[in-house]
Image (cartoon, rainbow, N blue to C red):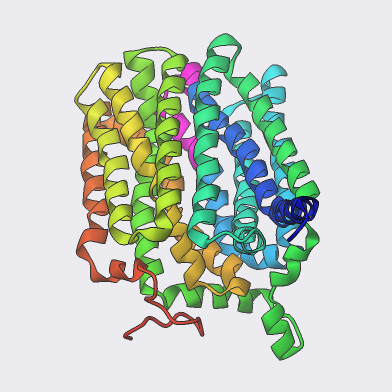
Amino acid sequence: MKAPEADGVKFAANALGLMRSGKGFYGLLSANLVSMAGSSMSMLAIPWFVLATTGRPMEAGLVAFAEMLPYVLVQAFGAPLVDRLGRRETSIGSDLAAALAMGAVPLAYGWGILGLPLLASLMALVGSSRGAGDIARRVLVPRLAGAASLPLERASGLYDGVNRLAGLLGGPLAGILIAAISAPAVLVVDAASFAASALLVSFTVDRSSREELGAAEERESGAKPGYLADLIEGFSHLLGDRLLLGIGALLIVTNLLDQAYFSVMLPLWITRELASPLALGVFSGLFGLGAVAGNGLMGALAPRLPRRIPFALSFLVCGAPRFLVPAFSSSFAPLAAMAFLAGLGAGGINPALGAVEFERVPRHLQARVLGALGALSWAGIPLGGLVGGVATEVFGLRAALASAGIAYLLATLGPFVFPVWREMERGRITAHQGTKLVGD
């Protein structure tokens, strides 16, 4: 018979081992929570600031374009450099660069020199830094999750859930701070959040994450391939996978419309109908609350559920209603109810989506392939702010909202209609030698 003390020592040792093995993953989650909370705040503060000072939706759209175009370009072409610099190191360096660029915005405003060109230039620096950092942190997930003994669906769900929680915390806080102090003050908080994220990654994620940086190719060839060869390999893998291309095509449309909504249409509707940044914060908080609940539910159930139908239903719920409700209502109550339901749907999307993407791409290629997929998926975002600004000025806000809602609905019917989406289910691919689909 074992002594109770021996069982206690064994339990403590096991618990300590689990804490150590999960330190990197949960440290990464903490860094993302802090950084994304700050970004959620600035996502509301920047358009509110531009609309409040100029009254022009087009200028809000131009600033959003200036931030997101470099983000997409870095996602498309920066992944081989992320591999060379190191994923941990890129995450830290990009956060520090974003902190400096974002912090310069309120400084320039305080000095009276912040015109539209300077604001757009600083936001372009923020966007390019975020693009590199997001690639780096995302492709750290599989290795760190493996060390923490987490299945991919759950790890992907936790990673997305932290982003949803950040929106839940950041949005309402932004509304309160904008109303109580000013929009530029919110940007100081965002700059601090980038710096805090860099510190968290530096202290919790070990350098052994660099083991994934092309080690397979180096062992086989004896030399690291060139930048162009790495870039071509990533895009070739993506182009050879029909499901990943389908995901990218869906996300081009939905991300473009989401950007038009959040950067122009929603702030404009609230400024015209309610004239209160607090309402913007309440909407963001309700959406975030629903997203956290949806993510928690799907993260817990995803390993035991099929993937395609829950994913498709979640997209239907989170998409078109956000546009159609404000298009036909002048009251905040329906918008608030819809915000929570849409968030619930949004929280159910990424656990399955992230697991599919990680499964279909070999680990040593993930920065390149997922960077290319991210660039494809986000290609519409730089245009989203411009489309939102032009549509609202030319056609009017309500007509623009209704048209965008119909387009969103048609796009999200794709997973129900096209057979390639059935390949989301487990067991539809072999171990990768490229991406070979079962039955091909």
Q: Is residue 60 magenta?
A: yes
Q: Which residues are magenta?
A: 51-66
Quarter-of-image position of residue 191 = top right
* Residue 60 to residue 86: above or below: above
Q: Quadrant of the N terminus?
A: bottom right
- Residue closer to the observer: 154 or 350: 154
- Residue closer to the observer: 176 or 107: 176
Quarter-of-image position of residue 196 = top right
> How many discs mark residues in the rendered view?
0
- Residue closer to the observer: 29 or 59: 29
**Does the image show residue 387?**
no
Q: Is residue 155 magenta?
A: no
Quarter-of-image position of residue 240 = bottom left
Residue 275 position in % (x across, y down) = 39, 12
User: Majority secondary structure of the magenta segment?
Assistant: helix
Q: Residue at x 39, y 17 (%)?
A: 271
Residue 370 position in % (x across, y down) = 53, 64
Residue 24 position in % (x across, y down) = 71, 53
**Does the image show residue 252?**
yes
* Residue 293 to residue 10: above or below: above
Residue at the limit of the structure toward the front, as seen here: 1
* Residue 397 to residue 26: above or below: above
Q: Residue at x 33, y 57 (%)?
A: 250
Q: Quadrant of the C terminus?
A: bottom left
Q: Residue at x 51, y 34 (%)?
A: 167
Residue 8 position in % (x across, y down) = 76, 50
